[in-house]
Amino acid sequence: MERRIEKMLEKWKNSSGRKPLILQGARQVGKTYTTLQFGKKYYKNVAYFNMENKNIASIFEIDLNPQRIIDNLSYITNQTITAGETLIFFDEIQNSERALTSLKYFNEMANEYHIIAAGSLLGVFVNREKYSFPVGKVDMQTMYPMNFEEFLMALGQDFLIKEIKVSYYKNTALPSIIHDKAMDFYKKYITIGGMPAVINEYMSNDDMNLVLTVQNNINTAYIADMAKHATPNTTTKIMAAYNSIPAQLAKDNRKFQYRIIKSGARAYEYETPIDWLRTSGIIEKCIKAAEGKGPLTAYADYNCFKVYITDIGLLCSKFGVPYNAILYNAKAFEDFKGPLTENYVAASLAIKGYSLYYWESNGIAEVDFLIQDDMGNIIPIEVKSSENVKSKSLNQYISKYKPPYAIRVSTKNFGFENNIKSVPLYAVFLI
């Protein structure tokens, strides 16, 4: 399956200022597969090393001389590692502190070698004091689940992608039959999500029961990681925080509340568990902005935030929402459409590299997301799960801050009216 991140990897390969690249992200987002496919496409050979193998990790314990390390790795794999022609891939690098530190020396003394290191729990590990992270000596890139565009690409819907892009940039409506087709694919994506293994299962068997099994296996793997890499007490709190997310989103006010995790819970008890989930790539935080002005970081209220799961399919499986309930708009799950839609938009914006913020005015008005464009403009984004697009909150925000334009995401077709750009749910990947 083609991934958009490949274009970034190609730029990294050809960059004159290239450094060893660290590719981080949650488990199962496709880091290993994508890197190996990239290596096969752009290099003569790939030298793959999994740092969970203690024998390989021991090579870094002697010293961190790059040439000695290369010679040792070449010997044990019985393949020639050639600068510029071989992609060296250190997988699960968080399991070897010394291998992580060695990237500094490769950058300083042997930068002719092309190195990618991947880590699923890298953010968790590097926060530990024992780790000497090669600050300034590596390039960093976060990998996310496949977004809706990549989902369509995997299903061979290149024509639909092209038509969506034309309508997005011209603000012209798609023919209703194509719009309806795109909405059907969007509904499928909501329940399947962007995990490559889940999408592959769907493409192979078209059996939603098997899809759900793969999603549950991924959730189980996340829980296993919590138990493996945190103390028992912290693990319990991480799991409690993670399991509370559906209930947090189901509230009318989706601001994260510690009392939802446990009666009487306090922020200081769960700050570390929430940070564990964030640095492991499982969740994204959306911070309240006190003002709709730039830069948003200057107006951030970090005590008020929302939490979203980075893969919408995993959230849907945690809700226990049946596939057909989404596909056929079952009334029994009408109340969950809002939370699922908002989470989908949040994840889509995070994949595009936006930091997530929302705006609230004294509990009276609220705009779901604020993004900052390349010119520093703050653009408000309102999310609707249906065609009902009336909103006093967005109008209040526009009246107060007068943004260059606003975005309304809903099931409605493309358009531009009253300085509000209408974006269908299936086109969020273009924002």
Image: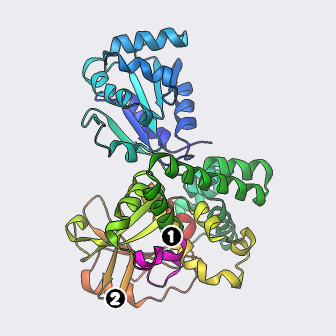
Task: Please name the residue shown 39% across and 36% down the image.
Answer: 22
Q: Mark 1 points at which residue?
A: 245
- Specify the color scheme: rainbow
In reply to whether residue 248 is colored magenta, the answer given is yes
Which label sits on residue 263?
none
Up/down of 362 relative to 358, above or below: below
| Left or right of residue 159: residue 130 | left
Q: Pointer 2: residues within 10 angstroms few (<14), some, or many (20+)?
A: few
> Is residue 348 in view?
no
Q: Which of 125 and 428 is in front in this view?
A: 125
Q: Where is residue 319 in the image (x, y as percent from the top left)?
A: 62, 71
When the figure is inspected, residue 341 is found, relative to residue 134, above or below; the finding is below
Q: Residue at x 38, y 33 (%)?
A: 21
Can the viewer see residue 37 in this picture? yes
Instruction: Using the image, determine if residue 122 lies above or below residue 311.
Output: above
- Ranked by sequence position, the earlier of labels 1 and 2 is 1
* Residue 247 locus on image (x, y percent): 53, 76
Which range is magenta? Answer: 244-264
Residue ID for mark 2: 363
* Residue 94 horizontal side relative to residue 172, left or right: left
Residue 324 image-quadrant placement: bottom right
Q: Does the magenta stretch include residue 290?
A: no
The span from disc 1 to disc 2 (Cα, nearest Å) is: 21 Å
Counting the numbered discs, the total is 2
